[in-house]
Amino acid sequence: MISHLMKMKEHFQHIEKMMSDPDVIKDQSKFQELAKERSDLEPVILKFSELTKANTALTEANEILHDKSADPEFAELAKEEASEAKATIEKLNSEIKVLLLPKDPLDSKNILMEIRAGAGGDEASLFVGDLLRMYQRFAETVRWKTSIVSGSPNDVGGFKEVIMEIAGKDVYSKLKFESGVHRVQRIPTTETNGRIHTSTVTVAVLPEAEEVDISIDPNELRIDVFRASGCGGQCVNTTDSAVRITHLPTNTVVSCQDEKSQHKNKDKAMKVLRSRLLEVKQRKAHESRAANRKSQVGTGDRSERIRTYNFPQGRVTDHRIGLSLYKLPTIMEGDVYEILESLIIADQTDRMSSLEEELLSA
């Protein structure tokens, strides 16, 4: 790893030298490109500098410890310094490995979260509403903004499906492992015999795609307008404001009818379509990587069962990392930080193992 860091340091110094070149300074596009690369490298270089100092301190302390003529008090002090240096080196090595992990270019994106009822009828639709509220509460605690893009409420107070936008700092990086099947086990209020019912809900976390992320040919779209159904204001049922967009090459269909304006519904539908097409592109890239390495925290496939919410036991279990927490009521109120952090750490640990193998074979 040291040789790899030395090369990075040389490259960092080369970038700094280029940024002081008058010709580069005149070329603002080139200068900004170099400035970004320098900014990306700087955290690693600073940690490497600390690591170099710690290694020097350890070497000096060991020299004193191996010197038989050294004063006993001086040797004792050197022993303490060696111990501190070893702990610092171990800590810095771990931090540098995390910094060296390839960055997911989508991590800083806002997301569209799709939550859909699966098996279980009314219970499943009610749990869609429960998960929606859970993620909304969590978003509030970290000062993210949420808004409903579209929803299909039903008669029992739940949702057949709902799509929510979550915007804020590094949203996708924190929530990307929530994609998959969430299973709930509880006794429905309508159950007279006290039997536990099992239902499922599917969650998909889609990084919000801009036009620069996904290019869509307008000629490959079929756009239909129709009269919206359900509650939504006086004119919702009297104008053709609802929009359905079909992406013909993939047969991806998106519809939106929550707004009274056809234009706003079309904009929302296009936002969802771009994100779904980006997800397909992302999944193909993931499958290519997974051919060489299986991620510890799963594939992110929305058909993969990832978590169980057991209400009688007050337990939430994430099956990918074997984590069980007996605080279901607080989790349903949005206290999901421990689960999310554990998944991120598991992913980092898995990728660090792969990185170490790559560095050893390099």
Image: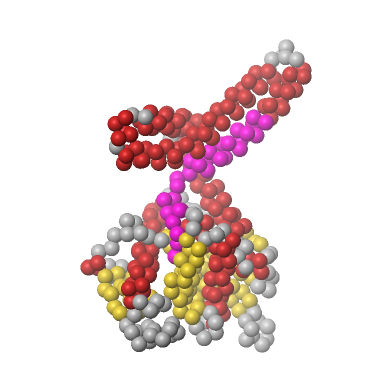
Question: 279 left or right of 59?
Answer: left
The structure residue drawn at horizontal position 35% and vertical position 87%, both measured from the top left corner, is 238
Residue 190 drawn in magenta: no
Q: Is residue 351 left or right of residue 90?
A: left
Numbered disc total? 0
Outermost right residue: 73
Residue 204 in view, yes or no:
no
- Decide if residue 265 is in sight here: yes
Q: Which quadrant: the C terminus? A: top left
Please tell me in which quadrant of the rendered image residue 245 appears: bottom left
63 in relation to 166, above or below: above
Magenta residues?
A: 84-113
What colour scheme does the image use?
secondary structure
What's the residue at 46%, 66% (across, down)?
165
Relative to 219, 356 lies left or right: right
Q: Is residue 313 left or right of residue 340?
A: right
Q: Position of residue 197 (x, y in %)?
A: 61, 79
Residue displayed at 32% across by 73% down: 263
Asked whether 304 or 339 is in front, the reply is: 339
Identify the residue shown where x is 34% and y is 56%.
213
Tell me: residue 99, above or below residue 196. above
Image location of residue 58, percent across then percent down = 63, 25
User: Residue 34's x, y, as percent?
Assistant: 37, 37
Front residue of 87/16: it is 16
Specify whether residue 102 is painted magenta: yes
x then y, percent, for residue 9: 45, 30
Residue at the far left in the pictured view? 219
